[in-house]
Amino acid sequence: EAEARAQIERILAIDTNVRGMPTARTVLVEEYLDGPEYSVEMFGVDGQAVCVGITAKSVTAGPHFVEHRHLFPAPLPAATAQLITDTVTAALDAAGIRLGATHTEVKLTADGPALVEINPRPAGGMIPELVRLATGVDLLDAQLRAALGLPPHLKAEEAGHAGIQFLLADTDGTLTAVHGAEAAAAVEGVESVLVTAA
């Protein structure tokens, strides 16, 4: 309890975030869920949730738990994938989400899948691009088609794999240059290299 109180006080003392914006100066305390993280990419069609696939997520150690890698589809045994999918389907049904893309984050704990969050939107973090590269399914096109009342194309055209790696600085400092992006992009199997800092 003392450790939790100290952490809460530390958080409340921060009045601006890393972008210089004012913080809400509130704290949400949640149970720590131990286990690997996944996201389930689903799509509501005719009132039924269709699982497009499960993404494996790698995160840094605490206290920040920053996502730095995604793999699609997640390398899971079929029974585990079905258990995660069934858990998310039940949650979407309970929430009444029945149309369009959803991105639901789950931790696979010793007690089974535990929901982290349900997002009634396509995933971020380039996950729709991973899905497209691995299966041919374009989740953004499917979302637009659903919004227009047209049937989405969700049938996988291929059974590949795709991944993304976010490079994170492990020390404080000022980034002055990025070298090697062209060489990295030339490696066989690399779809793209995107530098977002300079």
Image (cartoon, rainbow, N blue to C red):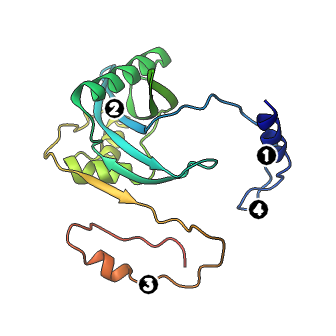
Q: Which residue is mark 2?
A: 43
Depicted 197 relative to depicted 141: above or below: below
The location of residue 133, given as percent across then percent down, is 24, 54
Name the kind of residue labelled 4 in the image: Gly
Does the CB distance between marks 1 and 4 fall below 8 Å? no
Q: Quadrant of residue 45?
A: top left
Q: Which residue is mark 1?
A: 11
Q: Which residue is mark 4?
A: 20
For the C terminus, the quadrant is bottom right
- Tell me which label, 1 or 2, sits earlier in the chain: 1
- Tell me which label, 2 or 3, sits earlier in the chain: 2
55 and 93: which is toward the camera: 55
For the N terminus, the quadrant is top right
Name the kind of residue labelled 2 in the image: Phe
Q: Which residue is mark 3?
A: 179
Does the CB distance between marks 2 and 4 fall below 8 Å? no
